[in-house]
Amino acid sequence: MTRPITLFTGQWADLPFDEVCRLAAAWGYDGLEIACWGDHFEVDRALADPSYVRRKREVLDRHGLSVWAISNHLVGQAVCDPVDERHRAILPARLWSDDPETVRRNAAREMADTARAAALLGVDTVVGFTGSAIWHTVAMFPPATPGMIDAGYRDFADRWNPILDVFEAQGVRFALEVHPSEIAYDHWTTRRALEAIDHRPSFGLNWDPSHMIWQDLDPANFILDFAPRIYHVDCKDTRVRVGDGRRGRLSSHLPWGDPRRGWDFVSTGRGDVPWEDCFRALNAIGYEGPVSIEWEDAGMDRLDGAAEAVGFIRRLAETRPPAASFDAAFATPAPKEGTAHE
């Protein structure tokens, strides 16, 4: 079987779940990576209403779609973050409190419940964010002491180990999207995050190259470096536009789509991600899981972009290594003309 191509529904949460299913099926997607917001998948309802998951499955079946992963980025972000007014806008109201520590604890309980809901849905992977108590120190002024950084990784481990206990009990894995603002945002912070939780098998990575490109990371080598931990793949693209003396990589607090930014997300296949190198790396590590298109492009209509992206990625995903080395033919010469053989 070829790797399934799915559509991440996070950027489509303004549409009803049934409508997103209809669109994805019409475009030729095999399934969805379902976001836990909007009406797409509600963790509390999945646990409280015995018919909720069945009804979601019925909608998927009606459109000929499958699901291999759900995503709860928004709640996961609040587990370790210094919580402020930005989080109130992305969290369910039932998790909010004026006390930041209460919000973090509520978010942790919800992530544990997300593992339980995923198991009910029959999927083994939850994609998401962790948040970070130390991301705000990345600019290094005022200088962050080594002790502050150490404390940040301890905080991550202390908050996420109990969540991962529930994931393991449910037979579900968490795939962190390596991303600026998370406890792991590049190569070395990913290594340190894995070390902080003693390389627990329930904690792996969601590979998304779009966040690596503007940091000058090699997304294909990242796959090879963390091969055993690549639990899920998201395909999102980025175009970098630095070099004119004005546009920088920190992007000047400018909104998505502003041409003065140093980089921006673009529709999959239209940016600077070396997609062929990346899919050859996925082949090399034997990744057989879903390949999910996370569509973001402030300068392109999403109905056009998502339809185009599935064809682009499917051609790459279906390219597999040959059964034998291309030069194997040289090892066994063809029989000479007229030679009898069985």
Image: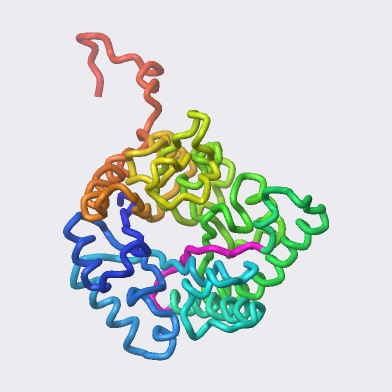
Relative horizontal placement of residue 306, taking residue 222 as reference (left or right): left
Above or below for 258 versus 84: above
Give 39 or 97, whichever is nearer the viewer: 97
Give 246 or 66, whichever is nearer the viewer: 246
Indicate the position of residue 339 as horizontal and vertical percent values.
24, 12
* Quadrant occupied by the C terminus: top left
Relative horizontal placement of residue 61, taking residue 106 as reference (left or right): left
Indicate the position of residue 253 as horizontal and vertical percent values.
51, 51
Above or below for 180 versus 342: below
**Outermost residue, left side:** 26
Indicate the position of residue 245 as horizontal and vertical percent values.
52, 30
Residue beneath the point at 51% across and 72% down: 75
Indicate the position of residue 121 as horizontal and vertical percent values.
38, 76
Task: Let me know if residue 84 appears in the view.
Answer: yes
Above or below for 129 versus 162: above
Say if the magenta span includes residue 127: yes
- The colour mode here is rainbow
Task: Let me know if residue 280 appears in the view.
Answer: no
Question: In the picture, residue 105 is in which quadrant?
Answer: bottom right
Residue beneath the point at 34% across and 64% down: 9
Say if the magenta span includes residue 36: no
Residue beneath the point at 37% across and 48% down: 257
Residue beneath the point at 54% across and 82% down: 96
Q: In the image, which residues are magenta?
A: 120-132
Above or below for 118 versus 270: below
Question: In the picture, residue 322 is in which quadrant?
Answer: top left
Relative horizontal placement of residue 218, taking residue 32 as reference (left or right): right
Give 1 or 308, whichever is nearer the viewer: 308
Total marks placed: 0
**Outermost residue, top side:** 337
